[in-house]
Image: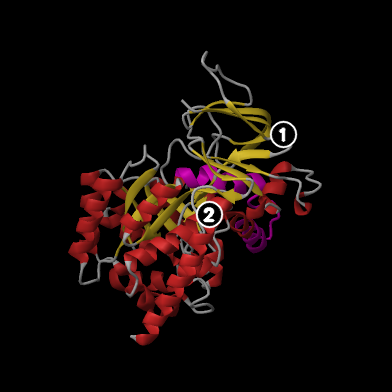
Amino acid sequence: MRDLLIEGGSLIVPGSRPGTVAVAAGDLAIRDGIILSVAGRGDLPGDWDPSIIEASGRYVMPGLVNAHGHAAMALLRGYADDLPLEEWLEDRIWPIEDGMEGSDVEAGTSLAVAEMLLGGTTCFADMYFPMHRVAGVCSEMGIRAVLSQGLIGIDADVDRDMDYSRRFAEEWHGARGGRIRVQLGPHAPYTCPPDYLEAVVALAGELGLGIHTHLAETAGEVETIRSRYGKSPAEYFRDAGIFSVGPVTVAHAVHVDRDDLEILAADGVGVAHCPRSNLRLACGIAPTVDILEAGIPVGLGTDGPASSATLDMWEEMRFAGYLQKGIRADARALPAEELLYMATRGGAVALGLEDVGELRPGFRADVIVVNPDRPHMVPGHDVLSSLAYCAGPGDVELVLVEGRPLVRRGHLLAADLEEIVERARRVAVSLTERVEES
């Protein structure tokens, strides 16, 4: 048994109602990776014999949940900037990805996971290829992950990719005590024709898997789907049965109207809001307040670091809040407690994770400790405001996933950071050289 007591911190506790977060003084008790008690509430077992982690004067909160991304694209950050999405993907990103090998993906994922852990992200959703390489990195480095092999229904290798997804799910879904989960990843409405989506839905039902996909990322996507099928992307996915399995998470939902929101809400679909990527690729600004008011679970995602530049979930919180305040001309839109909820429990709910993202007895002990003594965090009149609007990756001192320390005093314990960085540099150079030579 592994007993831990995080003692004396200010506990940041997302509530059971969306958008609510409270601050409580007290201790956090953990046994075998599960939270036993919060703020001194609850009975501890008679053989309780914890190791003590002193957190006096610190903020103790759930780890951040990055609800959508493409981690290995850390190798491509800075490679194809300042381009619209279609040109960025078709002319720059897809050609270099065609030359990626499994070891390249492993190197990029290791770099991304290191960045996420150091910044306080304890769980992330990833859609990429080949996902067994990604799963191997997650297994070794200790992070929680929801993984989807990207599926494109207009490729020549559609049958091969579907078969790969089956084998990947059979090997990795629920692995490492449930720390790694698998979903199916149909890429987007415009890359997946109806018969292909039917096959995805059938496989999801057979294997009991959820779905992770992109939806309504650009105005061009909406126009394309309407011209092909006479429907919005949300209607197209609904009619293909995508929303009939669960859980389902859609990334972006930038160009959705009230009818689309009714569809998503009725089918219990979660949304991963990626404001920085949407801005950088000039896709638009998602109507996040409207999505939340429709009763749809919303988490925050960085998207791939080739488009968002970093995997900084603290910055994602700020962008999400500032954008909604600005476009709605309402300073009350997405207040600090709502942003913190979206970055923790909201992301877990959007991904269908029942016991992640809260400091609550019975939940997984994915916990971070934040130092409020940095100059940019002082004077700290309001704890939630300080976290949502002031904190950054460098303020994270301790990171636990299922009670296992992966970062301590700001240093990565899960792997050799210097080796990860140097390997990523070598691989990134090699990738660009291969593209130039082809």
Seen as rendered, the residue at the extreme right is 379
Frontmost residue, 340 versus 51 = 51
53 sits left or right of 64 in the view? right
Frontmost residue, 180 versus 419 = 419
| Bounds of the magenta segment | 320-349
**Residue beneath disc 1:** 56
Q: Position of residue 6 (x, y in %)?
A: 62, 31
- Mark 2 / mark 1, whichever is N-terminal: 1
**Residue beneath disc 2:** 116
Frontmost residue, 149 versus 22 = 149
What's the amino acid at mark 2?
Met
Q: Position of residue 34 (x, y in %)?
A: 48, 30
Quarter of the image for the C terminus: give it: bottom left
Q: Residue at x 48, y 39 (%)?
A: 356
| Measured Cα–Cα span from mark 2 to mark 1 | 25 Å
Question: Is residue 331 within the magenta segment?
Answer: yes
Seen as rendered, the residue at the extreme top is 46
366 sits left or right of 335 in the view? left
Q: From what the image shows, is residue 250 above or below residue 176?
A: below
Res 43 quadrant in image: top right
Disc 2 crowd, CA 10 A, few/some/many (<14, 14-19, 20+): many
Frontmost residue, 129 versus 273 = 129
Q: Position of residue 338 (x, y in %)?
A: 61, 46
What's the amino acid at mark 1?
Ser
Q: Position of residue 423 (x, y in %)?
A: 46, 66
Q: Residue at x 35, y 45 (%)?
A: 181
The answer, for residue 400, to whether it is visible in the render is: yes
